[in-house]
Image (tube, rainbow, N blue to C red):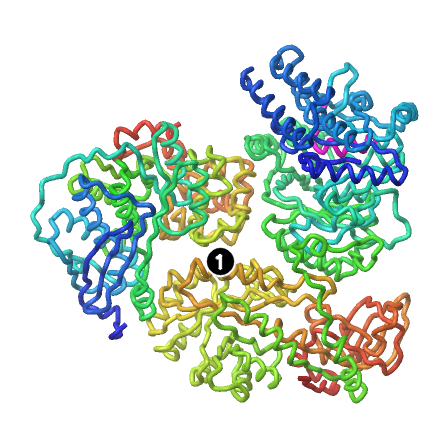
Amino acid sequence: MKFGGTSVATLPRWQNIQELVASRRAEGARVLVVVSALSGMTDALKHMCAQGEQGKRIEAAKAITQRHYELLEHMQLALPDTLAARLSDLARLAEEGPAAIGELAWAAKVQAHGELLSSALGASFLSHSGLPTQWLDARDCLAAVALPNQNERTKLLSAMVDAKPDPALSARLAALGEVFITQGFIARESQGRTVLLGRGGSDTSASYFGALLKAQRVEIWTDVAGMFTANPRQVAGARLLQRLDYEEAQEIASTGAKVLHPRCLSPLREPRVPLLIKDTNRPELEGTVIGPEVREHAPSVKAISARKGITLVSMESVGMWQQVGFLADVFAQFKQHGLSVDLISSAETNVTVSLDPTENLLDSDAIAALASDLAKVCRVKVIAPCAAVTMVGRGMRSMLHTLSGVLAEFGQLRVHLISQSSNNLNLTFVVDENVVDELLPHLHDLLIAAGALRTDDSALFGPSWQALYGSGELPAPEAAWWRTEQRQQLLALGAQATPRYVYHLPTVRHQARELKSLAAVDRLHYAVKANTHPSILRALAEEGFGFECVSPGELKAVMAVVPASAPLLFTPNFAPREDYAWALTTRATVSLDSLYPMEHWGELFRGREIVLRIDLGRGLGHHEKVRTGGSGSKFGLPVESIDAFLRLADAHGVTVRGLHAHLGSGILDEGHWGEVYAQLASLAERIGSVAFIDIGGGLGVPSHPGEARLDIAALDRVLREVKAAYPHYQLWMEPGRYLVADAGVLLTRVTQQKGKGALRYLGIDTGMNSLIRPALYEAWHEIVNLTRLDEPATGLFQIVGPICESGDVLGTDRRLPEPQEGDVMLIAQAGAYGKVMSSEYNMRDAAEEIVID
Amino acid sequence: MSNVIQPRLTQVFRFVRSSYADGVAELVYAFDDGEELIERVRFPQAPVVPAARADAFNAALRLLHLIAGVSYYKAGVPPKIEVSGEPLDDSTADLLDALYLHGLAEFAYRNGLDLRGRIAFPRGGQAKPAVGKLGLPQRSLVPIGGGKDSLVAVEAIKSIDGEATAVWVGNSALIAACAARTGLPTLNIQRELAPGLFELNRLGAWNGHIPVTAVNSAILSLAAIIYGYDSIAFANERSASVATLEYEGQQVNHQWSKGYAFEQLLGDWLHSHVAADLDYCSLLRPYSELAVTRAFAKLTPYFDVFSSCNRNFKLLGPKPAGRWCGQCPKCHFVFLALAPFLPKPRLLSIFGRNLLDDETLAAGFDALLEYQDHKPFECVGEGAEARAALYALSQRPEWQEDALVARFRSEILPQIDIAELALEPWLAPAGSHRVPPRLRPALAAIDQ
């Protein structure tokens, strides 16, 4: 059992260790505890090593001694002899300085004292708490081996141990007692000098001991329950990985996961000792078990990670790579400049390598010198800052077919390098660093959606990080309205006739009220293009919403049902002149998003107040076709044209009263609106006449089970923060899908089945003519058999409609109960962009709309 | 507002009165007979001003009132200016005429106005004899802007163990973070614009760039008297004195109030009207932007907090993109000017991206080079400086394949005389400055 620095720094944490060790004893196991130094000690010791003056060293040693005395006092223990001996050793080392045994050997010996002290203290504590514990000097067990590429520094400060099962040691310990405590991080080399194991050294020590003693298992006790499918700081929905094999775990640890140092797995592989990661604070959680290959599971991507700060060196040369020794010469340059190469990709004329962000790279002239030397033999390009995005999973190549949607995502980005190692454990893309924070959570969702990350396999995947450690405010998602009280009514409606859209007004109101809780927002407009059903318009008018329309047709439809007091916005895109002319006769506030209307029809707008829609230069959203920012999108006036627009506006007596931007749809990261808001507000400050900022909509609605909802409280905090900086602007928003998506379902009936190869097709009586989102955006809609909602889902189906298009697929690889002709199927989240986008294609009957209140 | 004003049709801009109590200065203005516009400047924990400094205080407060009026005057630019109280002497009126004319030159250019002959502060007061020394404490106010320049100035003063306070006006998380990183005592003065100004803007007031450094300078002059400092050490470089463009015979300089002409006018005025021992100077005056960026390149501890970007100054993100928009001329210039002096990976980690490998930014960098365009209306270096920096990069293998560097080599370089592209001449100090003897040794830290 290994415990890290924070776990051994206080009395309560030691009591925790005592309980855990006692529980293992109760199971009949003999326990070896491996500890790190008290948190902060290794740094304090390093600091002491850096002191040139004897006086300062002695002072530093005294401070370290004091820290241990304090803990001892908390434990109400007298100074044990082992600890006293270690402390006097440390004092002597401080006094002597490095002169006698050499700088590095001395530093290693000094730094080893962090663990020597903590373990001596722990032995005394455990023994006094009823667990007789033997203090073991790790240096007597772990013998460092000399390796060919080591220099004096690596030999002493990042040593390796060749740990093979040693029955003699096991026997020796068995004779001594049941509970032992020893030090992580340290070992002894052939000349008898103390050496350090380098970064992650304590975990590695635990593994070495596990291998030496051929332990039942190695337990790494830390502050998190194990490895996750992604870094939880980047992807809150990351899932706990409950089972991994050594190679996968090592790959995940190497490409990002901080919980375990990759080095500590290889000693365990041969003796097949499993390693368990456990959370000290929550020992009831399963944790991650790393062991020999797990055979009985389908291949799955296990994790994604991103490493930032990567620098690429791309070397271009015609025909020289094949010359014997050429590459060796090139790589010799990297060695000479002290740069170590990580990823490599090569082609006939180009070799590109990646460098990790070391101090040498960032703060010396190494890269400049390297480039000068390389430039003599090839063309060099230094590309940075990049990030390596890696997917890890055993048998990566066999999963390529499931990754098409994921690969399409990379198609949107600048991919500088792709690497796939022959061990078939990973697939790495090197992209621009600035896209990674947004990319990673999105990629995680895409992998789940594509069935490449099989989170449905509960043997491999545990709960999400959010569920385990999230801010605690994650209520179990409410069961959708159609699952519970309305189910019978829906079954009756479906039995009468299909296809039918059914809208649930209480859900619309619930969503509306949630948005009304955003205190920073002064005015909310419903983007009616999502669903123009009169009952929905009326319900939202009653909730005090304004309405955002994009065409005269929408404006007319809205004006026909909402009271004359409801604010209206007219926000068209590439609308003809007569649309504007007509809209100006209504009470709607008109938006412009290009120079053309001002240049050519400026007089139309004379004396008017308008809203200017700006393109802030980048787009976001769940699919390329729903991104509305960036030069690849037709929406918005580019920032650089604002001055020209204002001059034209001035010339025509037009006042820009509002600034608007809308960057896309389906966005689940609340920080995004804060950025848009702040950017618009800072632009508004240069304009003067602006009274309000409209940050658009695009509030995401998660579609997959377990996907985190948009955190409205967090959004409110973000918006209020910006508002505090720009209190003189009103804030407007234009949500659409958020209000109505969950409120609507599409009812349809099973018509037939077909088997084709391994695939089973389930036919329903409507398709892309009623709901085009899956075909258009690859949108994922939950699909259930409402008739058999409680039956076990045993078959895997492709759900298809009757339209003569191969794209008429509503859902792929869906696990459902065995269906029968006439069963009522329900397609969820069809309240937005469902009926409004339906068509008469194939001249099939349109779906009827029914409202439940 | 009682009667709705058409700001652009106003006839008179009136300096109504100014007052000070409990650390708050109230500056009152009006157009015609419209409602009073009241600006407040808050000096935190202001001590009682010693009686010996009363005259100096009153002179500095009056100057602040007159200078801060520029924010309001520009809303209407009426033909007449009225100043209540004692008539201004010639040197005060000259200072204000120059400031309003040159400081609003960009505003006038952008709005198609000609302010020449329109700005005339009433004068007629007798010049009083020059004031004497007040025995102000030997310490400096160093304004912090969040960018590289003020941090270079701070470190220069720290290098001679000079006593100094990092000061800034207004709310800015970015500046607060930079100020905290300096380790100096800090002073955050708040300026509240009159709410009526927003209303005027909504009613169609003229809008545009104002000489904000002049306003801040006047605020700090008053602060120096209130708290007791003998010097105000700004960080304005040589290039701030270079005009952005010339328009119908008038020089238009975006950073006129950061230029040497204004520094001289205000410095002399403070010596003769406030205190002979209150020095107003720029520590970086003898240096080019490139000399300053070279000095800044050694100040690693600031790399993850500073930003010179124009966008997003009020809010702070942890990521580079939260401090550097990558789109504005300031981002472009600072990136380019730092590049010759930092390892490439370090520079890119500051900005979070490589601006010189992005073809879409070609026009922005062209403007900095004054290639096919004039210098941008921003606080950026001279075109020749930008060309020298880019030339230096074009000679370095780790940069020369990047899109905009390659484009410079193939397209722009053949059109310029290489003899004019050397970096070294930019690194030497040159020209006059007003750094007082006490602070002069600090310049050595910038010269290295």
A336, above or below A390, in the image: above
- Residue A12 shows in the view: yes
Q: In this rendering, would B20 be left or right of A350?
A: left
Q: Residue at x 36, y 32 (%)?
A: B157
Front residue (pair A554, B345): A554
Chain holding disc 1: A
Q: In this rendering, would A193 be left or right of A512?
A: right
Could you say which quadrant of the image residue B71 lies in?
bottom left
Q: Residue at x 47, y 45 (%)?
A: B408
Taking the magenta stretch, the answer to whether it contains residue A197 is yes
Residue B8: x and y, percent? 25, 68
Taking the magenta stretch, the answer to whether it contains residue B303 is no
Front residue (pair B12, B412): B12
A299, above or below A38, in the image: below
Front residue (pair A574, B303): B303
Q: Quadrant of the C terminus of chain B?
A: top left
Residue extending furthest toward the top: A100
Q: In this rendering, would B111 be left or right of A774?
A: left
Q: Residue at x 47, y 79 (%)?
A: A567
Neighbor class of circle 1 (other Cα within 10 Å; few <14, some 14-19, many 20+) is some
Residue A852: x and y, percent? 69, 84
Q: Which residues are magenta?
A: A196-209
Residue A499: x and y, percent? 76, 84
B411, above or below A66, in the image: below
- The residue at which mark 1 appears reads as A721
Residue A45: x and y, percent? 62, 25
Front residue (pair B271, A751): B271
Q: Quadrant of the N terminus of chain B?
A: bottom left
SS for callout 1: helix
